[in-house]
Amino acid sequence: MENFTKKTAAFHTLGCKLNFAETSTIARQLTGAGYQKVSFDDAANVYIINTCSVTDNADKECKLHVKRAMKANPDGLVVIVGCYAQLKPEEISAIEGVDLVLGAKEKFNILSYLEDLEKSEQHAEVHSCEIEETDFFIGSYSIGDRTRAFLKVQDGCDYKCTYCTIPLARGISRSDTVENVVKNAKEIAEKDIKEIVLTGVNIGDYGKGEFGNKKHEHTFLDLVKELNKVEGIERIRISSIEPNLLKDETIDLVAESKSFVPHFHIPLQSGSDDLLKKMKRRYLTKLYSDRVSKIREVMPDAAIGVDVVVGFPGETEEKFLETYNFINELPITYLHVFTYSERENTEAVEMEGVVPIAERKKRNKMLRILSEKKKMAFYQTQLGKTLPVLWEHEEKDGKMFGFTENYVRVQKPFDASSINQIEMVKLDKIQPDGTVSISPIFEEFLAKV
């Protein structure tokens, strides 16, 4: 087919770290088959968009990037994969410019679908199984685009949170084998990537479905212990983990580990016990505060990130203030704030007490301001300390940026030789952009090294 004489492919990822890991795996499949990877704004033969569907904005973003692809090459083939593709395949197939929609089971067989695919004026081809058929595990990790690699260890979720579509988009909870995760971690180490971020839909549930059954052959703690033995990885970071699945033993291991870093991201969603019950979360605020206290006890300087949802049905002003005050009193570092949006086929859609959109936005803004205050207060406690920073590729206004182990974002004058290097620096001042500059003495020292 004429379109494929050059065989170029471009990729864009929406959503979570798990999506980035899977996009990289799909990209390696295509490059292994002879495709050259190009920028998404280049004139590629194939554009692959890996979608999210956590919020309405993610759906709109999909359409935006289809337009981007069509602007770069009106004759390019556009393929949509990911959560939105599984949940709304027919809706996506009607988007002008889309040629192929692949569901959760089909996305890793993309090469076979591309063989005979042609640009069409009609609705896109749709290949999407029933989500119950998605009961297998495909190992994935991201490399090449970042200083860190996202390593997928788990997929799917058996929880039934009343606002969430992820189980409908990704299926049941299932896990990679310990052996394969360790193998992938060693492969990443051999590529001189300094940091691994463990990712999944519900990584604390790791071990379920490891060998195709519903039993836990291993636990998340077992996995962490094995990864702690892998040589050549400077840092391992645990991504979002449910508070009820974050055990004392895991926290203690991280505190003692040379490779696991003192950084946790723990979803809260609400500081109101009434709303946590309506959301069908598997904990109440007492357990959550216990987890934060345990981390602070053994790692006083750990970063603790929190997910929170505003505007859930029944969130009165009083219940929102419960959340605000609960978070305000917790010794946490930063928030990821999500505005509740109605999602089809979820229990919450039918609930009473709908919060007006304007009120949702107001509450979101209040929590984002609180998040910034929390982060700056945490950064203030780190000033004067000498900490290792992993420098990244980005250059902005002559500066480069990196993160400490406990997730303080640091800047210094750009130096290409520092990219993907870990350097000990003394944290000096919080800058107007919210990053921390390093001591001038250290700048001079690093320039001479």
Image (tube, rainbow, N blue to C red):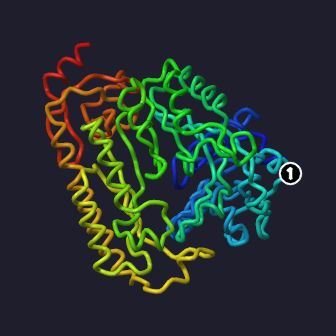
Position above or below: 289 against 315: above
The residue at the point 26 percent across, 13 percent down is 449
Position above or below: 411 against 81: above
Amino acid beneath label 1: Asp
| Farthest residue, direction top | 449
Is residue 26 among what the camera can see? yes
Neighbour class for label 1 at 10 Å: few (<14), some, many (≥20)?
few
The picture places residue 62, in percent across and down from the top left corner, at: 58, 63
Q: Secondary structure at mark 1?
A: loop
Position above or below: 232 against 342: above
The residue at the point 20 percent across, 49 percent down is 376
The picture places residue 326, in percent across and down from the top left corner, at: 27, 63
The picture places residue 221, in percent across and down from the top left corner, at: 52, 36
Q: Is residue 104 left or right of residue 420?
A: right
Residue 187 in which image quadrant:
top right
Is residue 63 among what the camera can see? no
The residue at the point 45 percent across, 40 percent down is 238
The residue beneath circle 1 is 116
Q: Is residue 424 left or right of residue 92?
A: left
